[in-house]
Amino acid sequence: MHVFIGLAFLAIIVSLAVAFFYLMRDKGTSNKTVNALTLRVGLSIALLAFVLFANYMGWIHSSGFRP
């Protein structure tokens, strides 16, 4: 479970790096930056939904807030 969440975070970071690369390379002439950022937002939402579902199903456990 932790490996899957780690890989999802890695995919989000890679998508952000790809968006930055296209932003610097294309100078706004194509939609590649927008597509990469859209993918990043979709991956982030999917990861959040998966973590909430996994917590609900008991696959992962939250440790709670301890100041």
Image: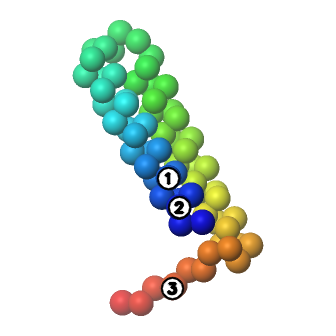
Question: Circles 1 and 2: CB distance less than 8 Å?
Answer: yes
Q: Which mark is on residue 7?
A: 1
Q: Which residue is mark 3?
A: 64
Q: Is residue 52 left or right of residue 67?
A: right
Which x, y percent locates residue 46? 61, 50
Which of pointers 3 and 2 lies earlier in the amino acid sequence? 2
Q: Is residue 7 left or right of residue 51?
A: left
Mark 2 belongs to which amino acid? Val
Instruction: Give the residue at the far left of this rendering.
Output: 24
Which x, y percent locates residue 35? 49, 25
Q: Secondary structure at mark 3?
A: loop
Q: Quadrant of residue 29?
A: top left
Colour scheme in use:
rainbow
Which x, y percent locates residue 53? 69, 65
Q: CA distance from mark 3 to mark 2?
A: 21 Å
Q: How many marks?
A: 3
Question: Circles 3 and 2: CB distance less than 8 Å?
Answer: no
Q: In what quadrant of the picture does the N terminus appear?
A: bottom right
| Residue in view at x 40 percent, y 24 percent | 33
Q: Is residue 29 left or right of residue 2?
A: left
Mark 1 belongs to which amino acid? Leu
| Residue in view at x 27 percent, y 17 percent | 25
